[in-house]
Image (cartoon, rainbow, N blue to C red):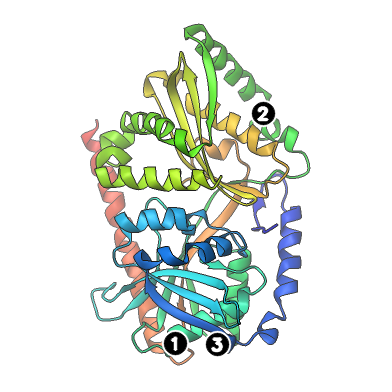
Amino acid sequence: MTATEFTSAASPMTALDASSMIASARRAPALDRHSAAAFEVEFRPLATLEPIVAAWRELAANTVEPNIFYDPAFALAAARLLGADVFAGLVWSDSTQQQLVGFFPVRIDRRRYGVPIPVLVGWTHPYAPLGTPLVRHDLAEPVIAAWLGHVARDPGLPDLMLMRLLAVDGPFAAALDAVRASRDCKARSFDRQQRAMLVPGADPAGYVDAAMGRKKRKELRRQMRRLQDIGVVRWSETKDATEAAGALEDFFRLEAGGWKGRAGTAATASDDSRAFMTRAVSGLAAEGKAAIYRLLIDERAVAALILLKEGSVSWCWKIAYDEAFARYSPGVLLALTVTEGLLADPRLAYADSCATAGHPMIDHIWRERVTLADQLISTRPDTEFSFALASGLEALRRSALSAAKSLRDQLRGRQSR
């Protein structure tokens, strides 16, 4: 079982913390056992990776830290819409039976700061809120070392790398820090944020009551009874790939009818985004890695949630509800039902909410938090000046974007009055 460290107001130290430390200790000698020269590295366009899907899928199932958004079914679907300029750094074991042991999707941003300081940027996008590369669990440090060494030696690649949305206390970040320290490379973190996570803990049966309190649970039961007064209430779980398209239609309708539809950011805003989501969810469902949950009244969906899964880890990817039923909290009721199902699964290590920090709904159900950050690193020790310059420019860039976002929100607030 792989694990990520979490913080929890109720439990500052979990069993997963201990397992993460044990795993780190076991990996400590890895750099000594495996030279970075024992691996082969290639750099290929993401869209050309269909022929290696079998090896890629095997790696995704055996990583030090899972990332469903880099699973081939999801990533190749996203590549058509959002990956035109994305490449993949592939690390292969140098043996008679080559294994794919590292997958680092990136794009080259040659003028990120308006000046010719190129940066290799980890691939994330609005549909993929996690940027942890895939590295084989028993070879994390030597694989990372092989990748960084390749980047440092290749004159066609930037010396600076910005890795997006990493769990700062996770096993991948720990391995990256160890390799970076051994190479005497600089690093600086940006935009630390926390989002809700679900970790079953020692008492999964009592988790929800402890998180929400009896008064809130009583109110939700009352809202469920009011829904039952309107019509026949039914819960639906769709895992079959052939049935996923129908369930997705309900999700698309609900999302388009809500605030994302009004903002023009719903999946149905473009045929390409709709097709991407359909391909991604159907492809993952065919491998048992996706499920769509719905709350229906008289067979009409009033809430829908898309859950993605890789091994013992789940991601609450998307949720939407019918705003005409907002007084009954259908999204909360559905999230609560899915949560109870996750907690009943003895294989679950943790679930990621994929939510923004301070989310008004899921933060009150899922008690644990994971800290994420972007990390700018140098791949060579002799790039102190360019690293310092890029660090300063990155900080200014983010400050400018934050100020622009704040101004935009203020203007929207005034227009809505």
Q: Nearer the viewer, mark 1 or mark 3?
A: 1
Q: Of the residues tagged 3 and 2, which is closer to the observer?
A: 3
Q: Residue at x 32, y 41 (%)?
A: 267
Q: Secondary structure at mark 1?
A: helix
Q: Which residue is mark 3?
A: 184
Q: Which mark is residue 152?
A: 1
Residues packed near mark 1 inside 10 Å, few (<14), some (14 to 19) or many (20 plus): some
Label 2 Cα neighbours within 10 Å, binned few <14 / some 14-19 / many ≥20: few
Going by the numbered disc 2, the residue's amino acid type is Gly
Q: Residue at (64%, 48%) from the top-left corner?
A: 350
Q: x, y (%) of residue 188?
A: 48, 74
Q: Position of residue 294 (x, y in %)?
A: 49, 27
Q: Residue at x 29, y 72 (%)?
A: 112
Give left or right: position of 400 versus 70: left
Residue 13 in sight here: no
Residue contact at pointers 3 and 2, CB within 8 angstroms: no
Residue 213: which disc? Answer: 2
Mark pair 1, 2: CA separation: 53 Å
Disc 2 is placed on an element classified as loop
Kindly check if marks 1 and 2 are in contact, taking CB atoms under 8 A apart as contact: no
Label 1 to label 3: alpha-carbon separation: 13 Å
Quarter of the image with the N terminus is: bottom right
> Can you see residue 44?
yes
Kind of residue at disc 1: Ala
- Amino acid type assigned to the residue bearing label 3 in the image: Asp
